[in-house]
Image (cartoon, rainbow, N blue to C red):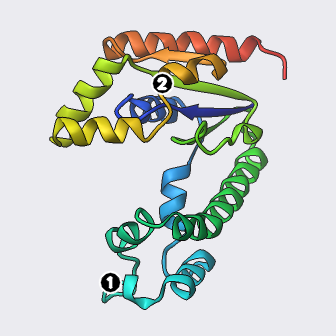
Amino acid sequence: MLIGLTGGIASGKSTVSNWLSEHGYPIIDADKIARDVVEPGRGAYEEIVGQFGRDILFEDGTINRKKLGSIIFKDEKKRSELNQIVHPAVRREMLAQKDRYEAEGHETIIFDIPLLFESNLFHLVDRVMLVYVDKQTQLNRLLERDQAGSEDAKARIASQLPLEDKKSRADYIVDNSGSLEETFQQLQNVIQHWSKEPF
């Protein structure tokens, strides 16, 4: 069974992911893979340097994400070019990890994909688990976590689909607006569902 774990910025998805990992579930982390596939020596790295030039590199040869970010955020075409390099490389690595975990005998595998809804990656998973918080809690936690201004925090939340809109397409919803104990209790309930569901 392939579970897509997703949420929104400051929803607490990482807390849920860590809990699942501690309880023996293999995690395929899309964000980590996205960082790994652009390391020097990887195919995506060579393509990015070929496309954007060596000006985007630090002296040690690694990609200066801030510099690359400033190029693509201002230019829709360049952002699309970068996505066409990175996204297929990330998907290939995710599927390779899935195959390894399956070969090891794992029956439930977690795909940790922050932008599962935004990137429409439902085809990769059997079920979707959404980590949900209400709007005000999300804003408060982001302000507390990043010490950014209110306008910046609101803009970052607005760049993703609202969590409220994601609820209708999720198979499991873990409401992380309350205490960690309440969140972990909901997770245990969800895991009991997994064991009963036919796949």
User: In the image, is residue 16 above or below residue 111?
Assistant: above
**Distance from the alpha carbon under mark 1 to that under mark 2:** 36 Å
The image shows residue 106 at horizontal and vertical percentages of 71, 38
User: In the image, is residue 162 above or below residue 82?
Assistant: above
The image shows residue 123 at horizontal and vertical percentages of 77, 40
Q: Residue at x 39, y 18 (%)?
A: 176
Q: Which residue is mark 2?
A: 163
Relative side of 75 to 110, left or right: left
Q: Which residue is mark 1?
A: 58
Task: Judge the density around disc 1: few (<14), some (14-19), many (≥20) Cα neighbours within 10 Å.
Answer: few
Q: Quadrant of the C terminus?
A: top right
Q: Residue at x 71, y 36 (%)?
A: 122
Q: Amino acid under label 1?
A: Phe
Relative side of 13 to 83, left or right: left
Q: Residue at x 29, y 19 (%)?
A: 137
Q: Amino acid under label 2?
A: Leu
Task: Please tell me whether mark 1 or mark 2 is closer to you in this view.
Answer: 2
